[in-house]
Amino acid sequence: MARVIPDDIDFGAYLRQTECSAKVKPASNFADELVAEFDEAHRDNAPEMFSTKMRGLLRFRPGEVTVWGGYNGHKKSMFSGQVALDLCVQREPVLIMSLEMLPARTLARMARQAAGFEKPTKSFIERFSSWTDGRLWVFDHHGRLSPDQCVAVCRYFAQELKGRHIFIDSLMMVVGSEDKLDEQKQFTTDIVRVAQEMGLHIHLIAHCRKPPQRGEDDPPSKYDVRGSAAISDQASNVVTIWSNKPKASKLESNPHDAQAQNEPDFLVTVEKQRNGSWEGRLKLWFDERSLRFCDERSRPVEPYVLGN
């Protein structure tokens, strides 16, 4: 089953920063990395979210931070769970720090997404749990975590467990107040630094503030992420997730509204991709039975292939 990282480990050693003197190196030390910068095949080999039309458009490169932003209740965590599942299929070691949800609930949603239907069988759940070994870890902590502790867990996962991807869900469980702009800026700086030093890709789930006039009726942008502007500025990638609640309201009034039925359930917008060439908006549909985000409304949802 998915391995759990308890919160009673002494993370003190991972709180210390690397000495600056150890970072002063001859330029020739980076010869291999320099060659890779000009190798398109190598550069485009980073993992992706292959289960939606985002495939080939956004890559999750080592040493980067991606901010997943959205209004409260717009399924940011559920979407990031599908991203994590895609990464696990690609044998990318993933740690989920779901500070707002118990581990069993997080895993239940991912198992449902993997199965492609509402109630996976016991045999599927057992196979899914076994398949996650070496792919998926969960931080067994529910509630707030200090910024230093969060960074220490990131270092521990990278150094001791050879991890590559960490999902921090969410920013407000690490830096609780929107008013602590300096603390938010410092935390963002710290996770950017640890991602670069350890070759991690850190996925940070963040809430967006609702515009005072139209509320949730319009999709958010990277400028609507709650708190310090440094969150979006320092991240390599910013992606927003918006649930089309106006569509849901129309269908409540008239379930046969054909125009509303053809509208997408979600808009996912790559607002920023520093080291990639594509930014833009994608229309996705949501399958309630599997909790999966899909490219088309009518195509059946297939289960994930849980190979070796």
Image (tube, helix red, strand yellow):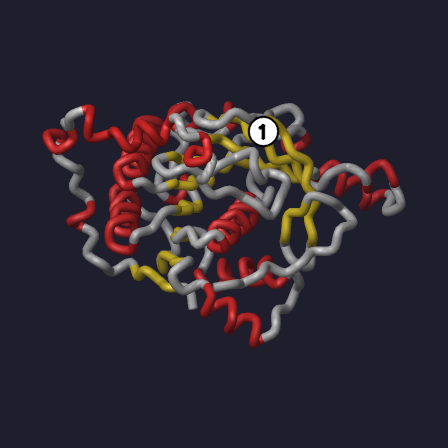
Query: Which residue does the numbered mark 1 point to in the structure image?
Result: 220
In this view of the protein, which residue sits in the foreground, 235 or 43? 43
- Residue lying farthest left? 21
Specify whether 16 is left or right of 176. left
Specify whether 106 is left or right of 112. left
Q: Could you say where residue 250 lies in the image, as x and y percent from the top left? A: 81, 39
Q: Could you say where residue 135 lies in the image, as x and y percent from the top left? A: 41, 58
Q: Quadrant of residue 120?
A: bottom right
Total label count? 1
Can the viewer see residue 245?
A: yes
Q: Residue at x 41, y 40 (%)?
A: 171
Secondary element at image label 1:
loop
Q: Could you say where residue 225 lies in the image, as x and y percent from the top left? A: 49, 29
Image position of 18 with respect to 5: above or below: above
Circle 1 packing at 10 Å, graded few (<14), some (14-19), many (20+), is many
Q: Residue at x 20, y 30 (%)?
A: 29
Q: Amino acid at mark 1?
A: Pro
In this view of the protein, which residue sits in the foreground, 299 or 179? 299
Image position of 149 with respect to 117: above or below: above
